[in-house]
Amino acid sequence: MKFAKFFIGGLCAASMMACGGPKESVVEAWWLPDRDPSNNPVSLFGEVPESIVEELGIQDGIPASMSAYLVKVDGMPILFDTGFGNRLAEGLAEQGVDAAELEYIYLTHLHGDHIGGLMKPDAFPKATVYISRPEFEAWKNMESGNTQQLQLFEMYADRISLFEFGDVLPGGVLPMDAKGHTPGHTVFEVGNYLIIGDLMHGAALQMAYPEYCASFDMNHEDAVASRVKYLQYAKEKGLTLAGMHMPGFVEQ
Ligand SMILES: [Zn+2]
């Protein structure tokens, strides 16, 4: 597991009166791969010219993973997505986090490889699951293909917290609109990290050529716009990228 520690300021901004001024928070993050890393085929991204494949050295595919991330803000654990839940409990336990005690789970979006770990009964008996309102509404109102998502809503009925983009979530985490992969796809800024969900399925290709979409992106035009926007944002702010299908953390 990669480990990094950053200090951030201003987390008390919302409660300045109570805490008496800005304080520095310690933000630590861990990559929790849910299975062994593998390569995504270039064909997943449509017609990529051979010249680009050669330039980037991705003839054998693009390094990828299926992952979740654990972040601790001043020791308070927050889980971002859950993969299918293959190795989740072990990954958390390695960092001293008991799934049965975990209180905060933030979701980037509601595809099965991100919510699977939530579907086992009593996997997270104390957790509140945070979902962007547009993501929740989109899956709730979908005409088909949403069986698992409806099941999730039922299982966590009284423990789902819907947020708006621009809210500040517990831990000082900032959720931002990154629609395209799904209608309410969310990236989260916390400390020096940008948790980017499925903004990219092939970082080695898409960081250089963000115009290429994986076939999984529901709205390609929006997905490209979000990718360009948040790659630029992370670069300007010097944020470390944490993507759920990336082979671990990537410095911008
Ligand atoms: Zn995914």
Image (tube, rainbow, N blue to C red):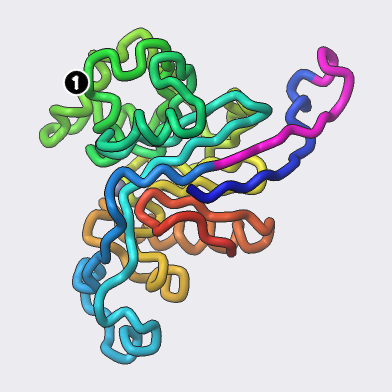
Q: Residue at x 59, y 55 (%)?
A: 240
Classify residue 123 as left or right of residue 192.
left
211 over 101 or under it: above or below:
below
Q: In which quadrant will I find the C terminus?
A: bottom right
Q: Is mark 1 within 8 Å of ligand 1?
A: no
Residue type of the residue flagged with mark 1: Gln
38 over 1 or under it: above or below:
below
Classify residue 104 as left or right of residue 240.
left
Residue 100: quadrant of the picture: top left
Front-lying residue, 130 or 126: 126
Residue 71 colored magenta? Answer: no
Element carrying mark 1: helix
Image coordinates of residue 145 in percent, x first then y, are 12, 36
User: Callout 1: 10 Å neighbours few (<14), some, many (20+)?
Assistant: few
Q: Residue at x 45, y 55 (%)?
A: 248
**What residue occupies the far right of the structure in this picture?**
20
Counting labels gives: 1
* Residue designated by label 1: 151
Residue 74: quadrant of the picture: top right
Image coordinates of residue 107 in percent, x first then y, are 40, 33
Image coordinates of residue 126 in percent, x first then y, are 41, 11
Segment tinted magenta in the rendering? 16-29
Front-lying residue, 26 or 41: 26
Image coordinates of residue 59 in percent, x first then y, are 26, 82
Q: Residue at x 31, y 57 (%)?
A: 37
232 over 125 or under it: above or below:
below
Q: Residue at x 61, y 57 (%)?
A: 233
58 over 190 or under it: above or below:
below
